[in-house]
Image: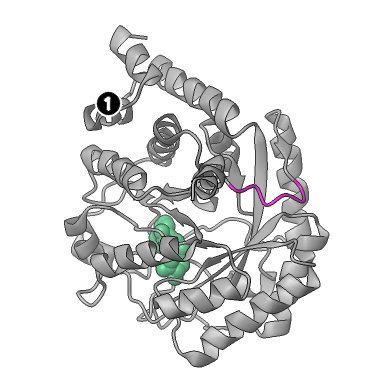
Amino acid sequence: MGNRLAEIIENVKTRDDLIFLLSVKEKEDLLAVFEAAYEIKKKFVGATVFYRGIIELSNICEKDCYYCGIRKSNGNVFRYLMDEDEIVKEAMWAYNAHYGSVVLQSGEVKGENYIALIERVLKRIKKDSDGKLGVTLSLGEQTGETYARWYNAGAHRYLLRIETSNKALYAKLHPSDHNFDTRIHCLDELQRLGYYTGTGVMIGLPGQTIDMLADDLLFFKKINVDMIGMGPYLHHHETPMGDYFTLETISNDDLLQKALLMIAVARLFLKDVNIASTTALQSLDEMGREKGLKAGANIIMPNITDTKYRGSYQLYDNKPCLDENASMCRGCLESRISTIGEKIGYGEWGDSPHYNQRNAEK
Ligand code: SAH
């Protein structure tokens, strides 16, 4: 390992440092970055994995993001919205399995019926779990008023990826009525209301450079996030990405390495935040999520959506665990995690030290 690399790993500060780390290619250097990130993870957040059981409650979406399989214009998707009892039942399954928290995710739906449905679901989950099950929402862009209603009903975390912090690339990935500044405004609102706030980007997007990824990391720092959820961009065959970009042919191995490196550099740079090892990593490699943990991530979001809906929530091609039910996923995950010598933080919310500190300073 060169001296410069060793020095930067010790003290990642500037944009140039980030670009340097994200450009590392030699096997030995990559290993040094991953190992250092793992040490920082152990020191700041520990070697405990926290589960967030993800419930994909609806694939109905008003948005038309060019990369996403459940975009409004995809007519080949069977659209569903779970009912209140189904959502609560799945959340309580997670509670009884000692998951500390769940994530309710869906396409973007607005309107009073939907807002009130989520509100009722939140209240029921809180009541039925004696306030113990943590709830993260990932329901897209909403008004500050809606975010406040859901916060008051019991949600305390929100995940809204910025997708890319580069405004020009954002504009190329979305139709013109999707607005980067609105997304920033939503993140501001969430933080103002007191939500533990997560954001993230897709890695390996066509047109995305290493400099842009470095800027993504600076963006996370600037907006003071508590959690980061990022994963590789994976093509979905029914999306128009190829109409707008020349799709690069990057091998699965190279894409996985890029995503893992981004996780590791995020850990070295931001230290005390939570970082998810996302399902998209698992699409590239059966052990992708475990590799993410070894690169510095500390959160896994097991899919607990009823299998009858999973085929309809295909954000990208080859999404894994399509026909496994929630408990099968649980069993296979648990043994994989113990293989890498980590334990699972059952029954704990597992908020990041960053969030706890931010709150203590208020
Ligand atoms: N409607 C919510 C949830 C979106 S789905 C919202 O807007 O926040 C969750 C995430 O899946 C998205 O934020 C996006 O980053 C990711 N995603 C969508 N399509 C993808 C693809 N083709 N490859 C990889 N990730 C994708």
Q: Seen in the image, is 267 located left or right of residue 118?
A: left
Q: Is residue 46 above or below residue 117?
A: above
Q: Seen in the image, is 96 located left or right of residue 356?
A: right
**Which residue is painted at 21% across and 66% down in the image?**
243
- The picture places residue 176, in percent across and down from the top left corner, at 19, 74
Q: Which residue is mark 1?
A: 17
In the rendered image, which quarter contains the N terminus? Answer: top left
Q: Do we see residue 95 in this rendering? A: yes
Q: Nearer the viewer, residue 301 or 223?
A: 223
Q: Seen in the image, is 71 located left or right of residue 288?
A: left
Instruction: Tell me the amino acid under the disc marked 1.
Output: Asp
Count of marks placed on residues: 1
Q: Residues within 10 Å of mark 1 (few under 14, many from 20)?
A: many
Q: Quadrant of residue 142?
A: bottom left
- The picture places residue 248, in percent across and down from the top left corner, at 26, 48
Q: Is residue 257 above or below residue 68?
A: above
- The picture places residue 348, in percent across and down from the top left corner, at 72, 49
**Which residue is painted at 53% across and 58% down in the image?**
319
**Residue that extends furthest to the front in the rendered view of this protein:** 362
Residue 18 located within the stretch drawn in magenta: no
Q: Is residue 162 above or below residue 73?
A: above
Q: Nearer the viewer, residue 191 or 58?
A: 191
Q: Main secondary structure of the magenta part?
A: loop
Q: Do we see residue 82 in this rendering? A: no
- The picture places residue 360, in percent across and down from the top left corner, at 55, 46
Q: Seen in the image, is 96 located left or right of residue 340?
A: right
- The magenta segment is 346-351
Q: Nearer the viewer, residue 308 or 22?
A: 22
In what quadrant does ligand 1 lie?
bottom left
Residue 348 located within the stretch drawn in magenta: yes
**Which residue is painted at 31% across and 66% down in the image?**
185
